[in-house]
Image (cartoon, grey):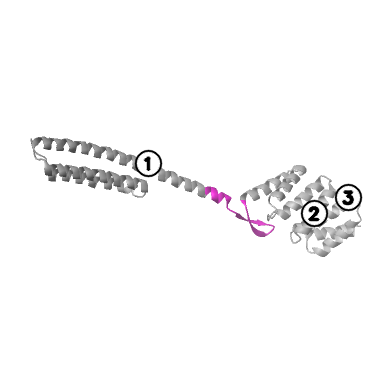
Amino acid sequence: MMKLSKSGLSAALLAALTWLPLQAHAGLFDDDEARKALLDLRAKVEAMRSELNARIDTKSDKSSTLDLINQNEVTLQEVAKLRGQIEVLSNELANAQKRQKDFYVDLDARLRKLEPREVTIDGKTAQVDPNEQKTYEAAYKIFLAGDYKAGGTAFSEFLQRYPGSSYAANAQYYLGSSYFAQRDCKGAISAQLLVLKNYPDSPRAPEAMLNIASCQSELKDKAAKKTLQDLIKAYPDSAAAATAKERLSGK
């Protein structure tokens, strides 16, 4: 029987050691856990090679050579097993990296939906939250549909939820208009007075004053005339002021 030389066994083991890092390098060295597993495997194979070399140095009879051959076969089987483990680790790492990438892509998409967007309100540019805009537009849609009670409730809830919104002046005005449409003049006057108090520079302010004057007329309140005069004085160039002049001229 041909004896297995020390150089032959060493060459076989070195070939196995060379193959392992080449197969694992592409996917495993980016992950600490996978890299540790590779280092452990390499250490194990190196220990086997050292053990075989030691036996060759101390035993030269045929029975010892057969033991070494058998041991070498066991070592090759172990290497094959370790190769399988490396492939499993490579697949698991690749899948984990894909899941992580998909997670961040989804998270980024969700965050973008929540980012403030730029809108134009009464000729002015403003940054508003997407949900804020959606809530306001829903309330306005109800108002336009003629459901003034539900519309008023929607505008009231909007103002409670977004008191500092760029839509607040409009929401307050339409809340007052909802009351007026329901013939609730006292509620309408209270709501429109808040427009004048909190948003005097809003384009809705002159319209709010006109609405107040209309309610005062409905209530037979003599203050209606003064409200129209104040409207003309405060907002002379507005469309509401032109309407106020027409009403005064007809009295």
Query: Can you name the residue that lies furthest to the front here?
Result: 58
> Residue 191 location, x and y as percent?
79, 52
Q: Amino acid at mark 1?
A: Glu
Quadrant hosting residue 4: top left
- C-alpha separation, residue under disc 2 versus residue under disc 1: 65 Å
Q: Amino acid at mark 2?
A: Gln
Q: Is residue 226 magenta?
A: no
Kindly identify which numbered label has been placed on residue 92.
1
In terms of sequence position, does the residue under pointer 2 or pointer 3 come before the other?
2
Q: Is residue 115 magenta?
A: yes
Task: Give the label, 2 or 3, closer to the camera.
Answer: 2
- C-alpha separation, residue under disc 2 versus residue under disc 3: 15 Å
Task: Give the label, 1 or 3, closer to the camera.
Answer: 1
Q: Nearer the viewer, residue 106 or 242?
A: 106
In terms of sequence position, does the residue under pointer 2 or pointer 1 come before the other?
1
Q: Quadrant of the C terminus?
A: bottom right
Kindly identify which numbered label has been placed on residue 192.
2
Bounds of the magenta span?
A: 109-129
> Residue 43 location, x and y as percent?
26, 46
- C-alpha separation, residue under disc 1 versus residue under disc 3: 77 Å
> Residue 81 location, x and y as percent?
27, 37
Kindly identify which numbered label has been placed on residue 218.
3
Q: Amino acid at mark 3?
A: Glu
Q: Quadrant of the N terminus?
A: top left
